[in-house]
């Protein structure tokens, strides 16, 4: 069996169904590229696609989808709650099987050059693929969003890693990198006061002194009359979902607002959910090996070697 990666490209479109389907289509029909999940959020105005498979067909499909996104999405007219600098905002490569993080970094660098050559969209590298230490964090690369980067891109410290010091006139720039599995986790609160979500996100995220391996922002879900603490948990093994949830619940109680629901956005490792299930059910000494489907898959995978 050859190398298997996960890739989770994010596109700045969550409202026009025909554009969403056109972007996703290359992932459906490319052999060797498995479309695991895709979902669009109109409040975020963002499409998140989850892929798995061999590196080559995934890269081919990404270029095709990026060309569609660049043709259909104009960042000068785009509005949404989620930060972005590009029509294709971010493309992370995640090692799953028979491939190392170092190999995913090399893959990201090689693909970034190909991506610019074929789409004309400049590239920034982030996380493990970052060429500058300050660009490891995605939020640093995206500082000021498209509008701010358009003004600052001529400054040497904000030059793209691939391409000239200017943005694509409508598609902006794309951030490409290599990282560990990330859990996109949202907590929706029963209030319309977005200030509360922003204060809770500040209390929870690592950059403000909260939990390590947690990134978060506060957003308004205007069509639902709720607010959201939108989180990326970059290492679920070091900070479990239940720990993040309970801290948010405690902070929300201080503001007198309830946690209405939580959301998993995109794909998630079974271990991340099982750990929290064991916590809330108070299961003593629980192991994922006790889950029959996981045990069978592990045994079948061992036979396939």
Image (tube, rainbow, N blue to C red):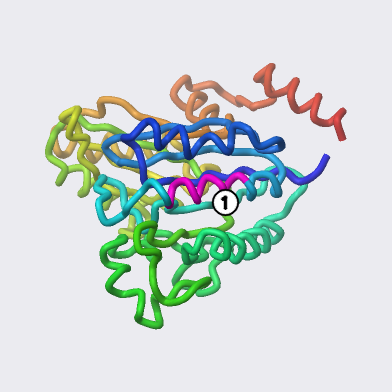
Q: Could you tell me residue 298's position as x and y percent?
A: 76, 28
- Quadrant of the rendering where the C terminus is positioned: top right
Q: Could you tell me residue 3's position as x and y percent?
A: 76, 46
- Quadrant of the rendering where the N terminus is positioned: top right
117 vs 61: above or below: below
Q: Residue at x 57, y 31 (%)?
A: 36
Q: Residue at x 66, y 56 (%)?
A: 104
- Give the camera-side residue of 249 and 110: 110
- Give the camera-side residue of 115 and 148: 115
Farthest residue to the bottom: give it. 156
204 vs 107: above or below: above
- Give the camera-side residue of 292 and 5: 5
Q: Residue at x 25, y 25 (%)?
A: 260
Q: Quadrant of residue 58?
A: top right
Q: Count residues near mark 1 (Cα–Cα under 10 Å), then give few for <14, some for 14-19, many for 20+.
A: some
Q: Is residue 66 magenta?
A: yes
Determine whether, in the image, residue 61 is placed left or right of residue 39: right
- According to the picture, the residue beneath numbered tag 1 turns out to be 63
Magenta span main SS: helix
Q: Is residue 163 magenta?
A: no
Q: Could you tell me residue 219's position as x and y percent?
A: 24, 43
Q: Residue at x 25, y 51 (%)?
A: 77
Farthest residue to the front: give it. 71
Q: Quadrant of residue 253?
A: top left
Q: Could you tell me residue 281's position as x and y percent?
A: 47, 19
Q: Magenta residues, as a range?
A: 61-70
Determine whether, in the image, residue 243 is placed left or right of residue 106: left
């Amino acid at each position: 069996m050859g190398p298997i990666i996960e890739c989770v490209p994010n596109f700045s479109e969550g409202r026009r169904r025909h554009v969403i389907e056109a972007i996703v289509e290359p992932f459906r029909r490319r052999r060797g590229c498995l479309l695991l999940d895709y979902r669009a959020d109109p409040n975020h105005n963002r499409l998140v696609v989850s892929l798995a498979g061999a590196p080559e067909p995934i890269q081919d499909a990404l270029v095709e989808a990026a060309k569609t996104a660049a043709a259909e999405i104009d960042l000068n007219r785009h509005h949404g709650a989620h930060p972005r600098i590009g029509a294709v905002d971010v493309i992370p490569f995640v090692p799953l099987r028979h491939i190392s993080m170092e190999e995913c970094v090399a893959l990201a660098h090689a693909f970034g050059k190909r991506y610019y050559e074929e789409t004309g969209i400049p590239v920034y590298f982030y996380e493990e693929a970052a060429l500058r230490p300050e660009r490891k964090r995605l939020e640093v690369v995206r500082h000021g969003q498209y509008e701010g980067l358009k003004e600052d891109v001529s400054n040497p410290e904000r030059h793209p890693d691939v391409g000239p010091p200017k943005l694509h006139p409508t598609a902006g720039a794309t951030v490409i990198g290599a990282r560990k599995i990330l859990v996109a986790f949202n907590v929706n609160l029963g209030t319309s006061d977005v200030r509360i979500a922003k204060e809770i996100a500040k209390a929870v995220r690592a950059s403000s002194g909260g939990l390590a391996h947690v990134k978060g922002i506060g957003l308004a879900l205007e069509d639902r009359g709720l607010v959201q603490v939108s989180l990326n948990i970059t290492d679920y093994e070091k900070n479990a979902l239940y720990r993040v949830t309970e801290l948010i619940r405690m902070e929300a109680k201080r503001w007198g607002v309830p946690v209405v629901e939580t959301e998993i956005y995109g794909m998630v490792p079974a271990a991340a959910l099982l750990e929290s299930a064991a916590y809330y059910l108070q299961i003593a000494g629980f192991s994922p090996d006790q889950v029959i489907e996981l045990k069978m898959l592990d045994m079948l995978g061992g036979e396939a070697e």
